[in-house]
Image: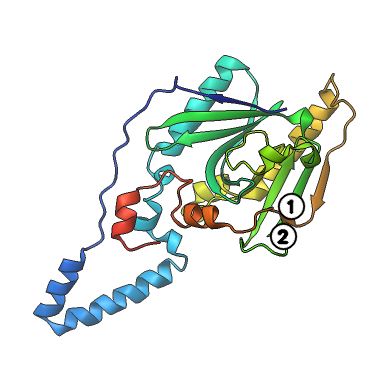
């Protein structure tokens, strides 16, 4: 069984934001009016930029919208959580990752994950105020199945999601109540689904902490060791790691479409994102 707690003890730290070095639309217009030559240079610069950043999330002014990528944000989150674990449980941390959680209604939520020798911690971290908002603890000895595969939906569903992910089970979905299943804000879901964070390719640092393969390489042996050392009901239990489609049981998907398109589950600079005309 997992436990969820809210925190108000972490101190908010101000974080200096970097300036946006991109020229304004007015600057481009004034350059074009002065001489036709700069217009050619401007087009060449655009080609060069698209070559350097084939993925739109690679472009610096896009990645800076995510507060998690700003200087010192990830490091502050790590130190906050390390300090909290040292004070409360004293468990040994195996690794730290920044992933996207996909809830049972297909909503994306930015999450920090930590694996210790006994526990999987899922943290909702406010990268704007630099504070932990919610922390869910899942005993590793309770995890009995992990599924890896592509996302799938019921045949009549209008919802969709590309890509692959993983799902961690610590309880049986069949035992989940009907109210919990159809409540988008339920915290009684006996599993958690994750995919890679959109900022994965912005730097070598984020490539390391946003990869599902890296997370799996630490999670699986930690669970196996927890089962081996367990003195309770988890003793002797074997972990199943399966490759199969991950079913998200939604049908209309209107709520997730609006939320995911506007990145509502991420700590994001909203106003400037709109001003740049990005979805």
Q: Is residue 189 visible?
A: yes
Foreground residue among 67 and 91: 67
Residue 116 visible to the viewer: no
| Residue most extreme to the top | 87
- Coordinates of residue 74 in the picture (x, y in percent): 46, 38
Q: Secondary structure at mark 2?
A: loop
For residue 268, side relative to residue 221 (left or right): left
The label on residue 148 is: 1
Rendered location of residue 278, percent (x, y): 37, 62
State the image quarter where residue 25 is shown. bottom left
Rendered-image quadrant of the C terminus: bottom left
Asked if the residue under mark 1 is in contact with the one under mark 2, i.e. CB atoms within 8 Å, the reply is no
Question: SS of the residue at dot 1?
Answer: strand
List the single residue furthest toward the front: 179
| For residue 185, side relative to residue 80 (left or right) | right
Give whichever of discs 2 and 1 has the lower sequence position. Answer: 1
């Amino acid at each position: 069984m997992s436990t969820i707690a809210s925190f108000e003890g972490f101190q908010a730290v101000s974080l200096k934001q970097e300036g946006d070095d991109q020229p304004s639309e007015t600057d481009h217009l004034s350059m074009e009016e002065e001489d036709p030559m700069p217009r050619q240079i401007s087009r060449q610069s655009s080609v060069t930029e698209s070559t350097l950043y084939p993925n739109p999330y690679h472009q610096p002014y896009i990645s800076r919208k995510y507060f998690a990528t700003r200087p010192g944000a990830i490091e502050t989150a790590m130190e906050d959580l390390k300090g909290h674990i040292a004070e409360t449980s004293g468990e040994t941390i195996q690794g730290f990752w920044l992933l996207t959680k996909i809830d049972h209604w297909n909503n994306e939520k930015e999450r920090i994950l930590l694996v210790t020798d006994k526990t999987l911690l899922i943290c909702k971290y406010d990268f704007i105020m630099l504070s932990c908002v919610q922390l869910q603890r899942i005993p590793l000895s309770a995890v009995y199945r992990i599924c890896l595969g592509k996302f799938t939906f019921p045949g009549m569903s209008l919802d969709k999601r590309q890509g692959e992910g993983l799902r961690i089970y610590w309880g049986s979905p069949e035992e989940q109540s009907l109210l919990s299943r159809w409540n988008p804000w339920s915290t009684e879901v006996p599993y958690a689904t994750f995919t890679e964070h959109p900022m994965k390719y912005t730097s070598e640092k984020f490539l390391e902490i946003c990869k599902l393969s890296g997370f799996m390489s630490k999670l699986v042996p930690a669970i196996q060791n927890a089962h081996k050392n367990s003195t309770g009901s988890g003793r002797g239990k074997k972990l199943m790691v399966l490759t199969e489609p991950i079913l998200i049981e939604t049908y209309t998907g209107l709520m997730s479409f609006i939320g995911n398109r506007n990145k509502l589950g991420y700590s994001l600079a909203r106003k400037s994102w709109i001003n740049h005309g990005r979805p």
